[in-house]
Amino acid sequence: MARKRATTRNTTQKDAVRQVLKNAAGFVSAQDLHRRLDTEGNRVGLATVYRQLGALADEGEADIVSTAEGQLFRACWQPDRHHHHLICETCGDAVEVALGDEDWFARVAADHGYAVTRHSLEIFGRCPRCRTA
Amino acid sequence: MARKRATTRNTTQKDAVRQVLKNAAGFVSAQDLHRRLDTEGNRVGLATVYRQLGALADEGEADIVSTAEGQLFRACWQPDRHHHHLICETCGDAVEVALGDEDWFARVAADHGYAVTRHSLEIFGRCPRCRTA
DNA sequence: CTTTTTGCAAAACATTTGCATGTAA
DNA sequence: TTACATGCAAATGTTTTGCAAAAAG
């Protein structure tokens, strides 16, 4: 059930990307992550950041969400459990939420003769901190 | 409740874009739509296609979904009713589906102290025709 | 050693913008 | 008329790629 894509070789760059991703409050773009590495004095090529983020996503360590501005990544808290995200539009912070009834998708799809392959659900809003700030 | 953005001026180009969008089976990219117009001998500038698709979306005549490959547009069947999409990964055909309990989002969000501003839900699969083909 | 990764700069795309010219109202 | 839309080409911004040099196993 768990998609076990081949794992890539261990490098300091991969660890660095993983580290920054984990420390990030919420979703970050590749460019953003690259900038953060740079700021903390850790020079990693932008291309490598893209490559590693892709690898981490493949390996189930990161989640991706596509927006009009590009793709956003975040470290996965529950690599094995299927989940969705509640994302703060102000600070990018995110919470993983589980859907009670995932079968709903399959049922609705079946009603239309469709076979579901995947689905994407993201909820955007403002987190407690940003609401009061 | 219905977002009534100012409507733009009527031009042959806008009509052409709207027409192709309506004739398209499912979601199409701006580039794609531009190519289709070109093929049918209707020369419309790419920039205009982008501008008009944006306008149509603003006016509630089109839906947008962001994917890793860019934004996809499709003519809206139910401009006034809130809905989601069931999209065929093979042919791009799409069906609009309504969610029974939209309050679920607000409830889950509230549990985490979030105030929901918007959400996005897309279901990808294979339509009846592509399943058998 | 042999195979992967890295870094860089260039390339490839998608999307937007500036501006002179056309056109709906 | 006159404000707004168009078309082009140039500008942006993101993501990918080619390739020689460096690192991992």
Image (spheres, coloured by chain):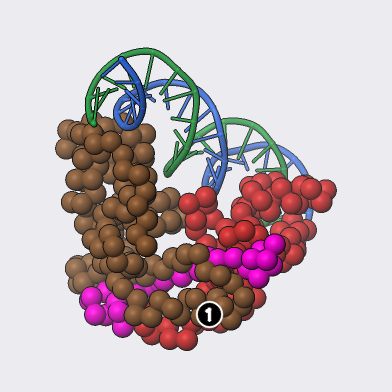
Chain colours: A brown, B red, C blue, D green
The residue positioned 48% from the left and 52% from the top of the image is B68
Q: Which residue is at the front of the view, B15 or B73?
A: B73
* In the displayed structure image, the side of residue A24 where residue D3 appears, left or right: right
Q: Residues within 10 Å of mark 1 (few under 14, many from 20)?
A: some
* In the displayed structure image, the side of residue B76 where residue A8 appears, left or right: left
Q: Position of residue A102 (x, y in %)?
A: 40, 76
B73 part of magenta stretch: no
> Can you say which quadrant of the picture contains the C terminus of chain B?
bottom right
The residue positioned 21% from the left and 57% from the top of the image is A25
Span shown in magenta: B107-133
Q: Which residue is at the front of the view, B63 or A132?
A: B63
* In the displayed structure image, the side of residue A83 where residue B28 appears, left or right: right
Disc 1 residue type? Answer: Val
Q: Position of residue A108 (x, y in %)?
A: 53, 80
Q: Which residue is at the front of the view, A62 or B116?
A: A62
Q: Which residue is at the front of the view, C16 or C13?
A: C13
Q: Where, by quadrant of the figure, is residue A38 drawn?
A: top left
Q: Where, by quadrant of the figure, is residue D12 drawn?
A: top left
Instruction: Note whether B68 is above or below A107 in the view shown.
Output: above
Task: Tell me how many marks there are.
Answer: 1
The residue positioned 22% from the left and 76% from the top of the image is B113
The residue carrying mark 1 is A108
Q: Is residue B131 visible?
A: yes
Badge 1: chain ID? A
Instruction: Note whether B46 is above or below B104 in the view shown.
Output: above
Instruction: Note whether B21 is above or below C22 in the view shown.
Output: below
The residue positioned 25% from the left and 42% from the top of the image is A17
Q: Position of residue B122 (x, y in %)?
A: 49, 68
Under tag 1, what secondary structure?
helix
